[in-house]
Image: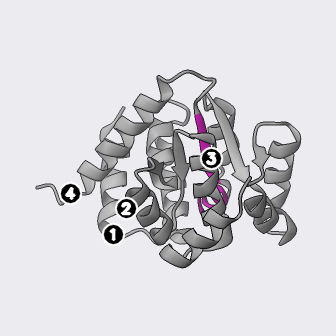
Amino acid sequence: VSTGVTTFYDSINIILTNVMQLSYNNFMIILDASTGILLAKIDLLETFVSNFPGKVLIPEKVEEEICTEKMEETPLVVKLIKDKKIRVLKVKNGQPVKKLMDDFNIDAGEAEAITIALQEKASLVATDDRNAIRACKVLRIEFTTAIAILIRSFEKNLIPKDEALIKLKKLESFARYSRAIMDDARRQIEGGD
């Protein structure tokens, strides 16, 4: 019996598949801090950005959040930026950032990620922030989450099943996913070969 959670992941996988088929020139994903940090915490960020067929971008505010607060993930993100696997972009016009922050009750990093997605006509925003997801839906911006990236990484054979399950367990301890979403993700990984 489906609870609608599978439909959510099916749609995320369809979006990721469609986006992966786009021209590399126009194909980009904008990471916000929440998803970048979660992917780093489960040791998936470097694998993801190294195998992503397009550009991986973060706004300046996200770089500031991750790199100046000296988090555990800071050295990895700094290295990926230095190695040009993640590019840092500046918002051209700050007005939409403030409006997004006010309208959707999101932080500056999430607002900059969405603004850059609109500004650069990005294919996808990666966010695990509930209000940023709501903003993406309202603005018709395709989005993904850390858990969807984990599942897709497994499906694309970037990580084996046992490693995917370990990363899922780690993600469960850091992220605020519902039990239904976690159970569905586990089923997708355990059922796939």
Q: Position of residue 145 (x, y in %)?
A: 48, 54
Please provide percent x and percent y for residue 182: 37, 61
* Disc 3 target residue: 119
Task: Please tell me which residue lies in front, 168 or 7.
Answer: 7
Q: CA distance from mark 2 to mark 4?
A: 13 Å
Residue 178: x, y in percent? 36, 70
Q: In this rendering, which labeled residue sits more in front, label 3 or label 1?
A: 3
Mark 3 vs 2: CB contact within 8 A: no
Magenta stretch, residue numbers: 28-39
Mark 1 and mark 2 in contact (Cβ < 8 Å)?
Answer: yes
Q: CA distance from mark 3 to mark 4?
A: 32 Å
Residues at marks 3 and 4 touching, judged by CB atoms closer than 8 Å: no
Badge 4 element: loop
In the rendered view, would you say 38 is above or below 125? Answer: below
Q: Which mark is residue 182?
A: 2
Mark 2 to mark 1: distance in Å? 5 Å
Q: Residue at x 41, y 30 (%)?
A: 17
For label 3, count other residues whose C-alpha is less than 10 Å away and answer few (under 14), some (14-19) or many (20+): few
**Residue type indicated by callout 2:** Met
